[in-house]
Image: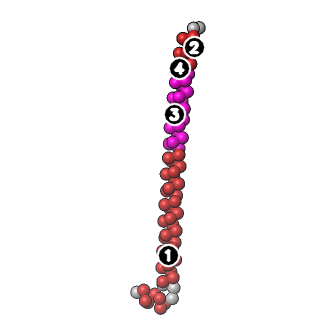
Amino acid sequence: MTLESIYYIGQTVAVIAIVVSLIFVGLQVRMAYEQTRQSNELARQETSRTNIITFITEQQRLFATPEDAACMH
C-alpha cells in the first residue's frame, strides 16, 4: 500500500465523518425546533387558560349579588 492510497483512504474516512456529523447536527436542529414549537404552544394554551379563568372570575364577581347583577343589566 502506497502513501498516496493511505492518504486517499484517510480523506474518504474524513469526508464520511463530516457527512455523518452534518446529518446528526441537522437532526438535532430539527428536534430542537420541534421542542421549541411545542413549548410555545403550551405557553399559549396556558396563557389562554389563565385569561379565561380571570375573565370568568371577574364576571362572577360583577354578578355576585342581585344589586350588582341589576346594575350590570
Q: Which numbered disc flags the more N-terminal residue, 1 or 2?
A: 2
Q: Which numbered disc flags the more N-terminal residue, 4 or 2?
A: 2
Please state which amino acid type lies under the numbered disc 3: Ile
Magenta-drawn segment = 13-31
- 72 or 16: nearer the viewer: 16
User: Tag 4's secondary structure?
Assistant: helix
Please state which amino acid type lies under the numbered disc 1: Ile
Please state which amino acid type lies under the numbered disc 4: Thr
Q: Which residue is mark 2?
A: 6
Q: Which residue is mark 3?
A: 23
- Residue farthest bottom in this picture: 67
Q: Position of residue 43 (x, y in %)?
A: 52, 59
Gap in angstroms between the C-alphas marked 2 and 3: 26 Å
Q: Residue at position x 53%, y 49% from top? A: 35
- 41 or 16: nearer the viewer: 16
Q: Mark 2 or mark 3: which is in front? A: 2
Q: Which residue is mark 4?
A: 12
Q: Position of residue 15 (x, y in %)?
A: 52, 24
Q: Local crowd at mark 2 within 10 Å, few (<14), some, or many (≥20)?
A: few
Q: Which numbered disc flags the more N-terminal residue, 1 or 3?
A: 3
Whether residue 37 is in magenta: the answer is: no
Whether residue 15 is in magenta: the answer is: yes
Q: Which numbered disc flags the more N-terminal residue, 3 or 4?
A: 4
Q: Mark 1 or mark 3: which is in front? A: 3
- Residue farthest right in this picture: 1
Q: Is residue 14 above or below residue 8?
A: below
Q: Position of residue 10 (x, y in %)?
A: 56, 19
Gap in angstroms between the C-alphas marked 1 and 3: 50 Å
Q: Which numbered disc flags the more N-terminal residue, 4 or 1?
A: 4
- Residue farthest left in this picture: 73
Please state which amino acid type lies under the numbered disc 2: Ile
Q: Which residue is mark 1?
A: 56
